[in-house]
Amino acid sequence: MIDHIGIGVSDFAASKAFYRKALQPLGYELLFEVPAELTGGGPAAGFGVPPKPDFWIGGGHSNVPPIHVALRAASRAQVDAFYQAALAAGGHDNGAPGLRPEYHPNYYGAFVLDPDRHNLEAVCHEPA
């Protein structure tokens, strides 16, 4: 089981603002920040469903090539809301909400590129 994951971002402030808005429909909040002085590199921000951050961004350099991160949504409505929030926050469409039966019959996901072109996905595995 994965406890947490972190990605590098090139513009920490812009990415932090993007993720605050994009992840809100999934119940994620900005829960923790660590200044650069304590990381030995750039600043870091931890997002998650309270009380624990499980998705982190670190300022300084973006991962090359960009990576894919999929976050589980409790419902298809959450996937739809994530997609709209991420686009409104400045993300770029990389796959509108919908079924992806090539993965399995109830795979409902949406894909958005973040400011560094990381592929962020929200996915629900539950039937409609």
Image (cartoon, rainbow, N blue to C red):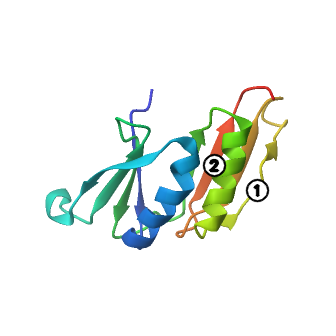
Residue located at (71% from left, 30% from top): 125
* Left or right relative to 41: residue 116: right
The quadrant of the picture occupied by the C terminus is top right
Residue 84 vertical position relative to residue 127 in the rendered view, above or below: below
Give above or below for 11 relative to 127.
Answer: below
Check the picture and name the quadrant holding the N terminus.
Answer: top left
Residue under numbered circle 2: 121
Q: Specify the quadrant of the image occupied by residue 10.
A: bottom left
Q: Position of residue 84 (x, y in %)?
A: 69, 58
Where on the picture, by quarter, is residue 98?
top right
SS at badge 2: strand
Q: Is residue 82 left or right of residue 3?
A: right
Tag 1 secondary structure: loop
Q: Quadrant of residue 76?
A: top right
Question: Could you give the CA–CA distance between mark 2 and mark 1, rounded to whole angstroms?
Answer: 9 Å
The residue depicted at 58 percent of the width and 66 percent of the height is 89
- Tag 1: amino acid: Gly
Mark 2 vs 1: CB contact within 8 A = yes
Q: Residues within 10 Å of mark 2 (few under 14, many from 20)?
A: many
Question: Height in image: 51 above or below 64?
Answer: above
Residue tagged by mark 1?
95
Horizontal side, residue 127 vs residue 111: left or right: right
**Image x and y of residue 41, in percent:** 23, 64
Tag 2: residue type?
Glu
- Nearer the N terminus, badge 2 or badge 1? 1
**Residue 80 % position (x, y):** 72, 48
